[in-house]
Image (tube, rainbow, N blue to C red):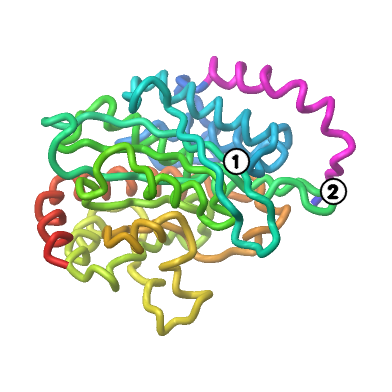
């Protein structure tokens, strides 16, 4: 992989607004390289999802570290997509600002911003709700190299927006909140801030669905963690697996696996889990690009990603259909 040093980025950052503006003009085109995606997506716009992933993981955004200019550019772009899709705001903004202390001892408090919108169900503002999360920050520049975080987690953000687009066109039964959260890489700070100051009563949140690394799997597999802690969700995931165009596997959520292979506390579903809210965490298996400069857009598996996008819609629809039962299950715990 070519070396990408930070000293050349000042000029590139001046082009961020041009890059974002140009992509905004092309997002709605149904053009995607045929050699990359043979699968014909049924529920999502695969081309738009791929282009958004490529944009968010471009060198111009400098790895999207919390507090950086690239992070701010990514956030503004996500806001524009929310506006285009017509997602509702809580109050008069999509932004939820917060200040928190990173996990590393001795680190100074950081300021972050979540981007939050929602789509109304049949009884807006009432009844159980789903929160779908994905983090948009990554590691930034380390030792002069850009960590672009294409799979981690430009892919999850693009998938979340693809799912939001589906429900913007096909209204859900229940309210669905879409939270693109900041500062995951330094301690899940954005999702912690969301759970600490939720835009709706915490009791209304019946389920969290979290996307973190969903675009890179040569084996064509995606894992769903969470059923070990909430076995009642197994039947839902089994149903999704029978309909999904990828192989859906349950696992990576048993504490006996150890802290590396047990993903219960490793992403933004953690604060929901700690608050007693069931979660389904979608992610691919670890790969050589994980937290490496090689996590570039060129390394994702586009056909799998398009299939995963449809799978995530199928799972969200199934959760929406079963949400009353999930709510009862949560209240019984």
- 43 to 141, vertically: above or below: above
Residue 322: in magenta span? no
Q: Which residue is mark 1?
A: 111
Q: Position of residue 277 (x, y in %)?
A: 27, 58
Q: Is residue 175 visible?
A: yes
Q: Is residue 237 left or right of residue 218?
A: left
Badge 2 is on which residue? 144
Q: Residues within 10 Å of mark 1 (few under 14, many from 20)?
A: some
Q: Which is nearer the eye, 163 or 280?
A: 280
Name the chief secondary structure element in magenta.
helix
Residue 11 on image: x %, y %: 84, 25
Residue 20, percent across and down? 61, 22
Q: Using the rendered image of the protein, determine whether residue 154 is visible from the camera's viewpoint.
A: no
Horizontally, residue 67 falls left or right of residue 174, namely right
Residue sitting at the far bottom: 256
Residue displayed at 48% across by 25% down: 79
Asked if 263 appears above or below 118 in the picture, the reply is: below
Rendered image: mark on residue 323: none
Residue drawn at x 53%, y 54% as measured from the top left:
216
Q: Which x, y percent locates residue 324?
A: 10, 50
Left or right position of 128 against 141: left
First-in-chain label (2 vs 1): 1
Q: For numbered disc 1, what is the local secondary structure? A: strand
Nearer to us in this view, 106 or 94:
106
Which portion, as a residue range, is magenta?
4-26
- How many other residues sit within 10 Å of disc 2, few (<14), some (14-19) or many (≥20)? few
The total of numbered circles placed on residues is 2
Q: Residue at x 44, y 58 (%)?
A: 283
**In front: label 2 or label 1:** 1
User: Which residue occupies the foreground of this view, 74 or 330?
Assistant: 330
Question: Under tag 2, what secondary structure?
Answer: loop
Quadrant (top left/top right/bottom left/bottom right) for the C terminus: bottom left
């Amino acid at each position: 992989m070519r070396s990408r040093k930070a000293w050349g980025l000042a000029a590139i950052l001046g082009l961020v607004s041009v890059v974002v503006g140009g992509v905004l003009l092309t997002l709605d085109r149904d053009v995607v390289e045929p050699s990359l995606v043979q699968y014909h997506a049924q529920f999502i716009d695969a081309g738009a999802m791929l282009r958004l992933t490529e944009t968010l993981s471009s060198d111009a955004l400098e790895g999207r570290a919390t507090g950086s200019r690239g992070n701010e550019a990514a956030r503004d772009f996500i806001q524009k997509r929310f506006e285009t899709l017509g997602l509702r705001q809580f109050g008069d903004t999509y932004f939820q600002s917060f200040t928190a202390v990173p996990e590393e001892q001795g680190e100074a408090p950081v300021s972050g911003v979540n981007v939050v919108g929602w789509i109304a169900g049949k009884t807006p503002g009432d009844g159980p709700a789903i929160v779908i999360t994905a983090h948009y920050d990554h590691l930034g520049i380390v030792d002069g190299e850009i960590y672009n975080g294409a799979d981690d987690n430009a892919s999850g953000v693009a998938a979340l927006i693809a799912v939001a687009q589906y429900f913007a066109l096909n209204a859900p039964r229940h309210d669905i909140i879409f939270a693109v959260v900041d500062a995951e890489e330094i301690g899940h700070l954005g999702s912690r801030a969301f759970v600490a100051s939720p835009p709706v009563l915490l009791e209304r949140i019946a389920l969290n669905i979290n996307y973190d690394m969903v675009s890179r799997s040569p084996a064509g597999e995606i894992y769903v963690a969470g059923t070990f802690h909430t076995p009642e969700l197994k039947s839902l995931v089994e149903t999704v697996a029978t309909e999904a165009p990828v192989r859906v596997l349950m696992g990576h959520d048993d504490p006996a696996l150890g802290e590396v292979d047990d993903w219960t506390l490793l992403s933004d579903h953690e604060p929901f889990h700690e608050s007693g809210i069931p979660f389904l965490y979608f992610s691919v298996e670890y790969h050589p690009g994980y937290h490496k400069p090689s996590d570039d857009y060129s390394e994702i598996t586009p056909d799998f990603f398009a299939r995963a996008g449809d799978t995530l819609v199928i799972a969200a629809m199934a959760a929406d259909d079963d949400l009353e039962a999930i709510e009862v299950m949560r209240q019984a715990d």
